Image (cartoon, helix red, strand yellow):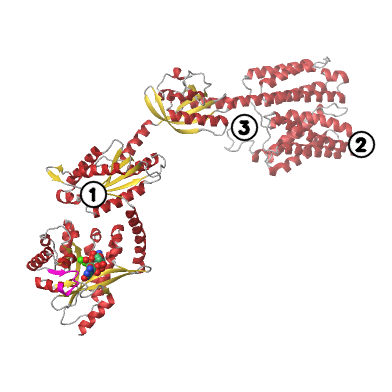
């Protein structure tokens, strides 16, 4: 509407920019305008009574105020007061009257501007806006009328009413005609061209000239109305407003010089003429403005909805995802489409992507039942969601559905939402993305993640899920006798031997063979899994009864007992099986744990057998949990103590060493021997920590033992658990403890049980050799209980053998025990190893041992294990003696 006057204007400084429009020059221009328009109105007023037909200055002043920044309003008001007063002075009114008019003018503009700018920038876009404009105008002219009337009354002592009425009419007409120019109004000429606008304006002008020309007195002013309505129907509010101003100027001018129907009746000088002009102008404004506004309003609404529809269509057609517009099916499809009838959706329209996705001819797809393409459960789910959306309880649905297309089954990600009711009844939009490839990749990954890579059996994660699913699928509680889920925990016996002797590659091949064999043994509903290492699990999802499971276990035992031939070697790997049985409510964790415990029982019972988890196992497991917790605290709280039992020289009874035996001073249960809890420490992984403490404590004690010049100070025997050797750094730990406690290496003997030494790996053998070279004694404890050949003694870097108690106990009446002791005496003697007989309880045993040539013994005959300080005192006594 307003453009910068010239391109030389500094950028950003537009004429209408507040600092320009309301700067000194701007205010001066406004003032000049107010003066000019006021003067013009006075000039055009009939000279005898001075009543102007309309007062355009009021419009200019109000617009100037409406647009003024807050801090410039006072200046504008002041200039309006001064300029209106000056205009009135100029036409000869006394100064106080002029001032009264000026002040009223300014007050009127202030009131109208305030009312119209109450909600921000004034606008004239709806009929409501127009009502507000009329209302504000009414309020303004009321103020003006009262102000002017009072001014007149004060000056002349009369004329209040007359003045008020004429001023109200002239200002009302002026404000209605001019204010639209200062408001935001839907402009533009719609679809009408400039040519039409020019033609229409010309027609109006010609009509006015014809109707109001001097000498024309026929009362046909209404003939202008159709032409004005033409403008209102075709052009925007602004154009109509400009046109009304032109009309007002022409009609006022002609009437002033005796032209037209209004002057014809009363003569150009009459107040009545002016009133008729005013009535005519107000009439014109009140007919054309509402028309123009309401048409503009409708046009804007239409444009908005067209734009949004265009946007929707564009988005629909060009979308990168499949788009389908769907309509609720009225059930008109063929019979048998029961699911489709309620909540089913038909295709109304679809874009190319969707058509390609559904692999159909777009034309044929239109009208086809869309929901019928979905798989059964999805179809019902969707129908239910559609009903919810129709009921208004849900705003949409999003999910992945399987869609059957002529080109095959797809997975489609669907976002379905209802269209607004205004778009049509029961319409929905579905956005569809083909996610088949992603789903396939996911499924592949899941399958991989669920499989043991070596054997192809299920892995632990899949097994867990399958057990839980099997439990969930069991028929609900039928007391005890019903079917159950059976978990068979199978751990290969002696598989370590295979790895050690043939290497890991061969070992892996054996595992693969084991898996193959397991598969052939299973029923169609069974599942085999590998948990890792040589641990396998067989799951029978629905076992009839326990006998059924035991049969399966026997089959597995038998199946794995036959040798497995790999690379020309035959390996016999037996298996120990733990069976756990679960009814409804059991969990995979529980069943696996129980089966594992039962498997350990099978191992302990001699391997190559199946053991069913029982209450006894459960009790043991419960105890283990409790003991483990207590034991951890015991270590922290220092409840563990080392007891010492002497190893004596059979010939003179002198103490040559002492075995350190751990005890637990339990706060409630008293002094506990290791048999009551050490197995738990082994099983729960506490042994490395516990063993480290034992080693350090034992060395500390031994380092403090009194020394005599004549005799050698006794060595300390420390028992070492297999678990301790599994943690790297054991050798280094031993050296560190010796260094820190100051115990000479020669005074330390580490005891390893024979079974432990049975399975020594190459690395451990090297470690043991290192210790031995450092002067530390190594003893094969409980010798004779294992299955290793006697020659094993030669292969190991040991320095001592401890004959197991059971041979000593049986020695006197069992020839075989005696033979073993005799052999060991000879063997150790010839190899230069020390020999200690354990568990010597009687004098007879001691004598027999001595006769056989054994020189050292340990047992209750000499002393039970005693607290460290008691042992220390005894040593001191012996030294002093
Ligand atoms: P072990 O190494 O064979 O220890 C000898 C066991 O025989 C000790 O039982 C001892 O009290 C007992 N004993 C000694 N003389 C006689 C006797 O004349 N007759 C009979 N019937 N028994 C006798 P204890 O202290 O209950 O220890 C049992 C087992 O616990 C030990 O057998 C050892 O394997 C283990 N153990 C004990 N203390 C420790 C330790 O500090 N560390 C480790 N790793 N194991 C330990
Ligand atoms: Ca021992
Ligand atoms: Ca022993």
Disc 1 is placed on an element classified as loop
Ligand 1 lies under 8 Å from the Cβ of mark 2: no
Residue located beneath label 1 in the image: 609
Q: Which residues are magenta?
A: 834-844
Mark 3 falls on what kind of element? Answer: loop
Helix, strand or loop at mark 2: helix
- Ligand 3, by image quadrant, is bottom left
Q: Report which residue position mark 3 lands on.
A: 5
Image height of 707 relative to 781, above or below: below
Residue 841 is situated, as x and y percent measured from the top left of the image, at 20, 72
In this view of the protein, which residue sits in the foreground, 322 or 508? 508
Please give the name of the residue rendered at 14% of the width and 79% of the height, measured from the top-left corner.
652
Q: Which mark is residue 156?
A: 2
Query: In the image, residue 442 lies at what x, y percent?
Result: 35, 36
Q: Nearer the viewer, residue 750 or 254?
A: 750
Q: For residue 536, what is the image quadrant?
A: top left
Q: CA distance from mark 2 to mark 1?
A: 132 Å
Position in image of residue 760 (x %, y %): 17, 57
758 vs 371, nearest the viewer? 758
Residue 589, magenta (yes or no):
no
- Which residue is rendered at x = 34% and y = 44% of the image? 464
Q: Compared with residue 847, is residue 678 higher up or lower down, i.e. above or below?
A: above
Left or right: residue 106 versus residue 294 is right
- Which of the marked residues, 2 or 1, is nearer the chain's N terminus? 2
Earlier along the polypeptide chain: callout 3 or callout 1? Answer: 3
Q: Is residue 540 visible?
A: yes
Q: Residue furthest bottom?
A: 881
């Amino acid at each position: 509407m307003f453009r910068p006057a010239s391109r030389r204007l500094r950028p950003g400084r537009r004429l209408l920019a507040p600092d320009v429009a309301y700067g000194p020059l701007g205010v001066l221009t406004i003032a000049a305008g107010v003066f000019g328009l006021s003067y013009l109105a006075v000039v055009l007023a009939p000279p005898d009574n001075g009543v102007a037909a309309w007062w355009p200055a009021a419009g200019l002043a109000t617009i100037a105020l409406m647009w003024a920044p807050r801090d410039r309003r006072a200046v504008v008001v002041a200039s309006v007061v001064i300029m209106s007063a000056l205009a009135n002075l100029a036409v000869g009114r006394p100064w106080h009257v002029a001032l009264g008019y000026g002040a009223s003018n300014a007050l009127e503009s202030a009131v109208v501007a305030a009312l119209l700018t109450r909600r921000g920038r004034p606008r004239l876009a709806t009929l409501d806006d127009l009502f507000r404009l009329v209302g504000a105008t009414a309020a303004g002219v009321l103020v003006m009328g009262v102000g002017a009337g009072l001014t007149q009354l004060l000056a002349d002592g009369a004329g209040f009413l007359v003045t008020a009425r004429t001023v109200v009419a002239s200002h009302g007409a002026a404000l209605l005609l001019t204010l639209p120019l200062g408001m935001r109004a839907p402009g533009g000429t719609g679809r009408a061209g400039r040519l039409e606008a020019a033609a229409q304006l010309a027609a109006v002008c010609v009509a006015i000239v014809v109707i109001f020309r001097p000498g024309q007195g026929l009362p046909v002013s209404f003939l202008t109305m159709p032409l004005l309505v033409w403008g209102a129907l075709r052009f925007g509010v602004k154009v109509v407003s400009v046109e009304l101003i032109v009309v007002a100027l022409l009609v006022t001018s002609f009437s002033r010089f005796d032209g037209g129907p209004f002057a014809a009746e009363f003569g150009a000088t009459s107040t009545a003429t002016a009133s008729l002009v005013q009535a005519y102008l107000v009439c014109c404004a009140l007919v054309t403005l509402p028309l123009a506004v309401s048409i503009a309003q409708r046009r804007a609404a239409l444009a908005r909805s067209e734009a949004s529809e265009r946007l929707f269509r564009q988005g629909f057609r060009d979308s990168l995802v499949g788009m389908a517009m769907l309509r609720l099916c009225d059930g008109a499809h063929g019979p048998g489409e029961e699911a489709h009838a309620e909540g089913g959706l038909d295709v109304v329209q679809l874009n190319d992507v969707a058509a390609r996705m559904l692999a159909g001819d777009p034309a044929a797809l239109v009208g086809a039942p869309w929901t019928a393409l979905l798989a059964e459960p999805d179809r019902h789910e969707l129908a239910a969601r559609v009903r919810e959306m129709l009921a208004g309880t849900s705003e949409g649905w999003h999910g992945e559905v399987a869609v059957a297309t002529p080109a095959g089954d797809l997975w489609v990600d669907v976002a379905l939402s209802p269209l607004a009711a205004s778009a049509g009844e029961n319409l929905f939009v579905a956005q569809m993305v083909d996610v088949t490839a992603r789903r396939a990749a996911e499924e592949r990954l899941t399958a991989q993640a669920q499989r043991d890579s070596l054997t192809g059996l299920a892995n632990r994660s899949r097994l867990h899920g399958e057990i839980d699913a099997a439990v969930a699928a069991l028929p609900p509680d039928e007391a005890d006798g019903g079917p159950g889920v059976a978990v068979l925990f199978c751990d290969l016996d002696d598989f370590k031997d295979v790895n050690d002797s043939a290497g890991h590659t061969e070992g892996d091949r054996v595992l693969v063979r084991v898996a193959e064999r397991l598969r052939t043994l299973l029923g169609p509903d069974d599942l085999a899994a590998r948990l890792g290492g040589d641990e396998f699990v067989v799951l029978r999802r629905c076992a009839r009864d326990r006998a059924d499971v035991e049969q399966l276990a026997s089959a597995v035992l038998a199946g794995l007992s036959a040798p497995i031939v790999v690379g020309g070697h035959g390996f016999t790997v037996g298996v120990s099986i733990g069976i756990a049985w679960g009814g409804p409510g059991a969990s995979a964790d529980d069943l696996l744990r129980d089966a594992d415990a039962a498997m350990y029982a099978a191992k302990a019972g001699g391997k190559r057998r199946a053991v069913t988890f029982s209450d006894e196992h459960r009790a043991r497991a419960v105890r283990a949990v409790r003991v483990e917790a207590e034991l951890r605290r015991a270590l922290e709280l220092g409840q563990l103590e080392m007891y010492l039992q002497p190893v004596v020289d059979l010939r003179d009874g002198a103490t040559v060493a002492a075995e350190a035996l751990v005890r637990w001073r339990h706060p409630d249960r008293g002094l506990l021997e290791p048999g009551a809890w050490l197995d738990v420490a082994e099983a729960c992984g506490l042994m490395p920590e516990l063993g480290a403490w034992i080693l350090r404590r034992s060395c500390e004690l031994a380092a403090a033992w009194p020394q005599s010049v004549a005799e050698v100070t006794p060595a300390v025997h420390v028992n070492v658990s297999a678990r301790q050797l599994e943690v790297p750094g054991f050798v280094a730990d031993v050296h560190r403890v010796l260094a820190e406690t100051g115990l000479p290496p020669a005074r330390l003997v580490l005891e390893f049980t024979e079974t432990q030494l049975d399975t020594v790996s190459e690395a451990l053998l090297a470690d043991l050799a290192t210790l031995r070279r450092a002067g530390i004694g190594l003893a094969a404890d409980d010798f004779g209980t294992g299955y290793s050949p006697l020659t094993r003694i030669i292969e190991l870097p040991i320095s001592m053998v401890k004959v197991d108690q059971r041979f000593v106990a049986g020695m006197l009446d069992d020839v075989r025990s005696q033979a073993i002791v005799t052999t060991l005496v000879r063997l150790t003697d010839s190899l230069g190893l020390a020999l200690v007989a354990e568990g010597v309880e009687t004098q007879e045993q001691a004598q027999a041992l001595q006769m056989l040539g054994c020189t050292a013994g340990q047992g209750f005959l000499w002393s039970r294990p005693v607290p460290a300080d008691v042992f220390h005192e005894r040593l001191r006594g012996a030294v002093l003696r």
